[in-house]
Structures are given as C-alpha cells and as structure tokens.
Amino acid sequence: MLFATEFPVKTSVDRATFVAQSIAWVRGMEQTTLFGSNTDLTTLSDEAMISSPSGEKLVLKECRAGDVYMCGVRHEINDGEGRTWRSEVTLRNDATAAAVRSKTQCIIASETGKLQLPRKPYFITMAIEDGWTAPDGPFEVSRDPIHLHNHDISLATAVVTGASSNTLPAVYISRLDDHSLPLSEGQISALSNRLAGVAHIVVEPSRRFSLQLMGRSLAKNPYLGAIGVCVSGFGVVNKYFVGHVHRTADDLFHAVYNTVARYVSNRLPKLGVDWVDIVDESARQFRAAAESNQFDADAWFALRDEENAEKDAEIANLRMELERIQSESMVSASAEVGFVSRGLLESFGPELYPGELADRIRKIIVSAAEGQLAQLDTRSLLVARHVAKLTRWSGGASQLEARIKSAGKDSDKADARLGEILRDIGFVSRKNGGHPIYIADSLQGVPQQTLSSSSSDYRAGRNAASQMIRDLGLTDLRD
C-alpha cells in the first residue's frame, strides 16, 4: 500500500536546500538510529548511503539529464511490528519549473506484520511551511482552505467544469440552503491540513453564489451541501453529501479524504519524478559511460544491483495492488444496498436535491414492503423490508418542504419567494397571460407550476405552497 503526491515548488529550491531538508526530516523522527556513533557511510559518484545495525537506511541519489537536475532521498525503517516503512522524496528542477514528489509505502517484512495505509510524510509539511511551494494554476499550495468571494464566480466555474489549470485536484465544498456548510470550520481546517500538498480545499462563499454557479456550469456544480472532488480536464468526478451512505459529517470527512488520497496516490507523475526514474537515468548514463570505457566499476555493479532491486520491488507492488483490487471487487460485489450508482444518476438527469433519486427508490421499496404495490413473493417482501430498515431518508425533502412552507406564509410575497425556489431547483419562468408559468424540462415527471396567489386571501400563499409540495411529491419522502 502506498501514499504519493507531488506539487510545484520554486526553482530556487536547489540541491543544498533539498539535502538539508531531507536530513532534518529524518533527524526529527523519534525512532531513527542513523545519527549515532554506530553507523556506516557509503559513497559513490552519484549516491551516498547511511545505514545502522537496526536495518534503517537513508540513501541520497542525484543525476542530471541535460538541463534537468534530479535529486532524491529514500528512507527505510522497521517499526518492530513486522513492517518496513519506505519513504521516497524527489526534486526535479529544470530552472524554469520545479516539483517535489513524495511516495511512502508500507511493506510487510514478516508473517506477523499487518498492512497499514501510509500517511503523508512530514517532509511535505516542512516544505510548505518553509515557503518552497510555487503556484498551482490559480491556487497556492497551502495548509489553509481557500475561501472564495462573490467575484470568484469565473474561477469556481473553471474548477467544477474542469477548465482550471491546477494539477492537484480541488475539493469544492458547497453551501446548504441555510448558508451553512456540511463540515464545521474545524473539520474544514483539518481536511485542508491533511490534504496540504495533495489537494486544494475550496469553500463556497454563499448559497446565492451556488445558484449563479449552477447557471454558469449547467448544473455540474456540487450544491446544497454536497462536496465535489474536481479534477482539471474532467470537472467534478465525485460528489459526497450527508445522507444514505455518509450519515454524519465525520463520515463525509473521511470519505472525501480517502477518495482524494487514493486518487492522487495512484496517478502517474505529472510534475515530478519517482525514485525509480532517477535510478533509470543514472543507469542510462553509466551504460553510456561504459561504452566509452569511462566509468566507475564499483558504482556500475552497485547500480545494476539497485536496478534489479527496484524492478523486484515494482513487481511486488503490482502484485499487492492486484490483490487489493480483487479484494475490493469482491467487497463491492457483496456490498449492501444503500447508494445509487453514478451511472444511474447521470442517466436519470438532475435531481430536486442531492439524494432525491435514492429517496424515491426507497419509497418504492417501502411501498412494496407495506403491500401497496402488486403482490410480491414472501422472500422479496422480506428483502424489501430489510433494505428499508437499513436505509434512512436523506433529509433533503424535509428541508425543501420547510422552505416552501416558509415562502408561502406571506401571501403578498409568496409568488416571488416560491418562484425563487422553483428557479433554484431547475425551473424556468415563462409568461402565460398575466401569470408566470414555471417549466422544468430537465426534471422528469414534474408538472409545470403556475403562480397566481391573491394577496387579498391570507390563505392563498399557504395553499400555493401546499399544492407545490404535492406536485413535487415531497410529502412521502420523509418519516
């Protein structure tokens, strides 16, 4: 299992700066034994290695390919519980652009060892705090969340549609209907800190901003408290919200973090280089030197051994990844019903609120379980009741219903307020004589709405709200 990420840094980050930071990083580890008196130092033309009797090793390697300078550090340490932790950090600098890439692996070293998911190495935090980072498209690589302002609508549109130029993904946090956020300020700060150097945390300024963004992005944006993972060139690739699957803000926090960390870890380098790239380039240069009989024989044989070891490690990693994918496929195949697939959502079209389609599927199941549909066999009824028991309403219908009722309380303002709600959820206003008609071509099975409340009738607004709730079918999508 591995954790990997990369981010742009200033071209002023040179060999001396990188090596000094690497030494400081390892020296700061409580478990390190590399800086005592009983250590070995091995040096070659392109490499230096410090090792201790405990098996801990720190290797520094560098090479130059034309105008590109590459330097890397690999640290290996046993944790005493049957695991070896291998961390690699590299610097690529061509004088016009530079990047740091980091990879950490958990390797089982004995039969008693249990795999653990690696976390981001502290080297990344040190680099960010020391001001190494360079702009990543429109964003700065930072440990703090990015709070958008109302004038940032073009930037937000680029992020959710995939038109932005940032290499790291962006986590877009939208506002709920009452302008609150799905995560607390503390959770947003914690998420930003954990994903520093991995992703940008982008926070929406207001619900009104969200409505503007919906129009500009053709409803591709996360909205009503949904959190979207946005990737340059693709736009929103995942959406998460508190509901059937992620029932609390903590569930939402961990789902977003795990998705982003897994995505970034599994993609190929775009800015920097891996440790194996430095080894390969060194080997290529040694081969070229060997052909001209100008090479260090000891260094050559050591490099050949290292190349072979790297290939063996890559094969082992591929086997472990294959095993993980197969295990996840088995778990996925047997997973409980409690979500709606992305493909089904896309084929259905826009929802009235996040989780609507799942609510309606649950309504069908509940109706079947209560004998309100055509008769089902005993086992199918048992399955329907079991699934209904395992799931719960998203709460979105109750929120939308409460908002509609509140808008209808004042008959003088009911038409304007109810019209605003209809526009928010995807209706378009058209004039038909003196009364506005609201039509939603993109929402299947929803009748058009005509607002014609009379201000002289104090019940008119409430009646219009009640009719809208019935037409939208919200009444039965809650307990």
Image (tube, rainbow, N blue to C red):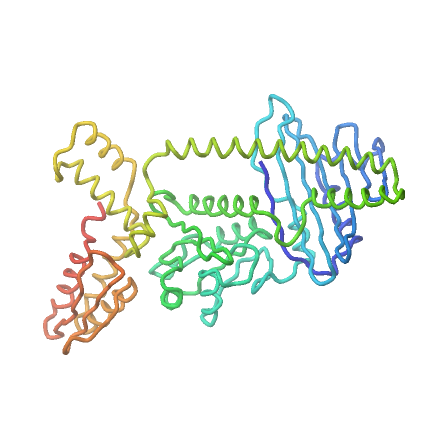
Residue furthest toward the front? 291
The image shows residue 266, relative to residue 79, as above or below, that is: below
Q: Nearer the viewer, residue 118 or 350?
A: 350
Q: Nearer the viewer, residue 50 or 269?
A: 269
Q: Nearer the viewer, residue 287 or 420?
A: 287
From the top left corner, tell me how far across and down residue 60 is, in percent. 78, 43
From the top left corner, tell me how far across and down residue 144 is, in percent. 56, 57
Quarter of the image that includes the N terminus: top right
Quarter of the image that includes the C terminus: top left
From the top left corner, tell me how far across and down residue 189 is, in percent. 52, 53
Q: Is residue 299 left or right of residue 257?
A: right
Total tally of numbered discs in the picture: 0
Q: Identify which residue is drawn at 72% across, 38% down.
A: 75
Q: Nearer the viewer, residue 425 or 179?
A: 425
Q: Quadrant of residue 444?
A: bottom left
Residue furthest toward the left? 457
The image shows residue 437, relative to residue 5, as above or below, that is: below
Q: Identify which residue is drawn at 34% across, 42% down.
A: 339
The image shows residue 343, relative to residue 14, as above or below, that is: above
Q: Is residue 309 left or right of residue 417?
A: right
Residue furthest toward the bottom? 434
The image shows residue 21, relative to residue 290, as above or below, that is: below
